[in-house]
Image (tube, grey):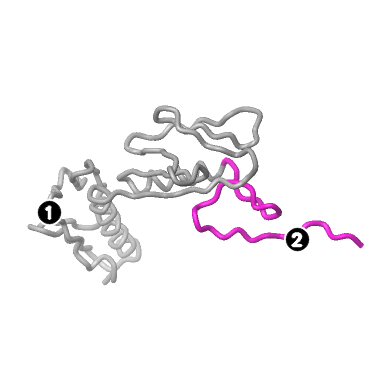
């Protein structure tokens, strides 16, 4: 049996989970999320936990077992605590500004780049450090996707280290040209 999938997902107080068709609807203080449940796994909602089981030991069903349990756990964590990714801007002249809900980035292009967030995603600048972009929301997948899309605009380059990187990300530096 899957080591991850066999663990039940605990539902904290203030959070409700209910099966609606083939989706699990999770409601909490920060919002509500819907988790699609595959037909090859069984999801049952008990009093204070959600249990995921599978029908057989086929490789596909074993993979779906752990995946479904993790998606449900992420939904419960999202509606209670939320998720956050932090990006760091490194480079002379590179800056970020928040205009309404949009993020306006100056990254050395001839024009500013405007990022419009998805529903449920909040883009902000860290008040202590103007070079840190904070992406937060209740959907882990959406937060990670927006962070990856912003990072893709200017990946950190290996010679000077300029670009957008995740906070704490190590950028391996290369030596430049050397004289003979």
Q: Position of residue 153 (x, y in %)?
A: 57, 40
Residue 177 is a magenta residue? yes
Query: Badge 2: how crowded within 10 Å, few (<14), some, or many (20+)?
Result: few
Q: Residue at x 24, y 47 (%)?
A: 79
SS at badge 1: loop
Q: Which residues are magenta?
A: 153-180
- Note whether 139 is above or below 66 in the view shown: above
Disc sitting over residue 175 in the figure:
2
Judged left or right of residue 47, residue 102 is right
On-image quarter of the N terminus: bottom left
Q: Magenta stretch containing residue 119, yes or no? A: no
Q: CA distance from mark 2 to mark 1?
A: 55 Å
Query: To which quarter of the image does residue 67 belong?
Result: bottom left
Check disc 1: other Cα within 10 Å, few if <14, some if 14-19, many if 20+: few
Contact, mark 2 vs mark 1 (Cβ under 8 Å): no
Query: Which image quadrant is residue 100 in?
Result: top left
Residue 112, horizontal then vertical, whole percent: 58, 29
Please provide percent x and percent y for residue 144: 42, 48
- Magenta stretch: helix, strand or loop mostly: loop
Q: Quadrant where the C terminus lies?
A: bottom right
Q: Nearer the viewer, residue 167 or 28?
A: 167
The residue that appears at 65% across and 33% down in the rendered structure is: 109
Sequence-first disc among 2 and 1:
1
Residue under pointer 1: 13
Image disc number at residue 130: none
């Amino acid at each position: 049996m899957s080591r991850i999938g066999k663990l039940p997902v605990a539902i904290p107080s203030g959070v409700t989970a209910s099966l609606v068709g083939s989706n699990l609807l999770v409601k909490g203080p920060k919002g509500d999320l819907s988790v699609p449940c595959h037909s090859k796994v069984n999801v049952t909602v008990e009093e204070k936990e959600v249990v995921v089981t599978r029908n057989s030991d086929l490789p596909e069903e074993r993979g779906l077992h752990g995946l479904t349990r993790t998606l449900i756990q992420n939904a419960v964590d999202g509606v209670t605590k939320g998720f956050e990714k932090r990006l760091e801007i490194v480079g002379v002249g590179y800056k970020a500004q928040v205009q309404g809900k949009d993020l306006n980035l100056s990254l050395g292009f001839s024009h500013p780049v405007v990022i419009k967030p998805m529903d449920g995603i909040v883009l902000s600048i860290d008040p202590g450090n103007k070079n840190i972009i904070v992406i937060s929301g209740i959907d882990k997948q959406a937060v990670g996707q927006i962070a990856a899309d912003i990072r893709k605009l200017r990946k950190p380059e290996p010679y000077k280290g300029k670009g957008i990187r995740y906070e704490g990300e190590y950028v391996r530096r290369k030596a430049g040209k050397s004289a003979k």
